[in-house]
Amino acid sequence: MALPVAPTIIKCSLFQTLNGQPIMNRFHVKVGATNPSAAECNAVAVAVANWWAGNVQDLVGDQLSLREVHAQSLAEVNGPQATFSSGLPAAGALTSPTLPGNVAFCVSLRSGLTGRSARGRWYWAGLTESQVSLNQVDGGTATSIVAAIDNLISTIEGIAALPVIVSYYSGGALRPGGPVYFVITDALAVDTTVDSQRGRLH
C-alpha cells in the first residue's frame, strides 16, 4: 500500500557506493509551499551535495563514494523531482582501509519532543580502520561526525527549509489525519559503539 501524500515535504536521498555495493541515506525536508516546486527540489539536492563535499568527504574512506543526490516532492503522487550529479561520483578522502559495509556509526536526530516518532537516526557509513578500535569509534571522529550532521541541519535551514522527521504511523497503524512532522533541532551520539547494518552484507 502506498503511503499517503505529505504536503510541504521533500524526500532527499543520497545514493552512494560502499565497497562496491549501492547504499543510501535518506531524510526529509519541509519547505514553505504546500506543493514543493522543481526549483525547491533542485535547491535541496544541490545544497546536500555541497554539504557532502564539505563535511563528509574528508571523514570517510575512499571505498565510499557519492553518486547522486535525489530530491522528490511527497506532496502529490506525480510531483516534481530533481537530481544532482554534477562532478560526481566523488570518493572519500581517507586511505586507511574502509571497514565492511555493515559497520556504521549511529547519530541520533532529536526534535526536542518526547516519543519514538519524534526521534530519528542517521547511520554514518564509510568508517575506516584508523577511526575504530575494539568496536568503538574514537572520540575525535565521533565529535566530527556529529558536527557534520549538525552542519546538515544548518545547511537545510540556510535554504529557508527545515529538516524533519516524518511519522506516518502511530501504534502500528497509519495516522488517520495523515503524517505528522517533527523539526530536527539537534544531532548527538548516544554512545561511540559501532552499529551493524546487516542489510549491507551482500
Image (cartoon, rainbow, N blue to C red):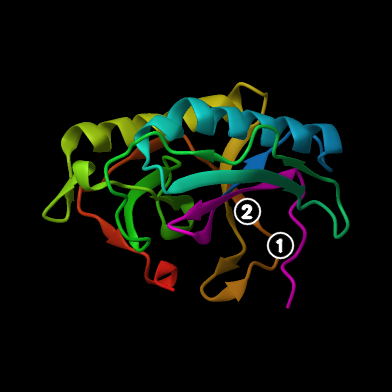
Q: Residue at x 39, y 30 (%)?
A: 58
Question: Height in image: 23 above or below 131?
Answer: below
Pointer 2: residues within 10 angstroms few (<14), some, or many (20+)? some
Q: Residue at x 61, y 21 (%)?
A: 158
Please state the horizontal and vertical placement of residue 127, each as a whole percent of the image: 31, 47
Farthest residue, direction right: 78
Which mark is on residue 180? Answer: 2
Query: SS at mark 2?
Result: strand
Amino acid type shown at disc 2: Val
Q: How many marks?
A: 2
Question: Height in image: 138 above or below 98?
Answer: above
Q: Residue at x 28, y 43 (%)?
A: 189
Pointer 1: residues within 10 angstroms few (<14), some, or many (20+)? few
Which is nearer the eye, 38 or 67?
A: 67
Farthest residue, direction top: 158
Which is nearer the eye, 5 or 202?
A: 202
Q: Quadrant of the N terminus?
A: bottom right
Please state the horizontal and vertical placement of residue 138, each as a whole percent of the image: 17, 40
Which is nearer the eye, 125 or 43?
A: 125
Q: Residue at x 57, y 38 (%)?
A: 163
**Left or right, residue 161 beside residue 202:** right
Farthest residue, direction left: 134
C-alpha separation, residue under disc 1 versus residue under disc 2: 8 Å
80 in magenta: no
Question: Height in image: 141 above or below 165?
Answer: above
Please report the bounds of the magenta region as a residue range: 1-24
Return the residue at label 1. Answer: 177
| Label 1 with label 2: CB-CB less than 8 Å | yes
Amino acid type shown at disc 1: Gly
Question: Height in image: 78 above or below 52?
Answer: below
Please state the horizontal and vertical placement of residue 177, each as a whole percent of the image: 71, 62
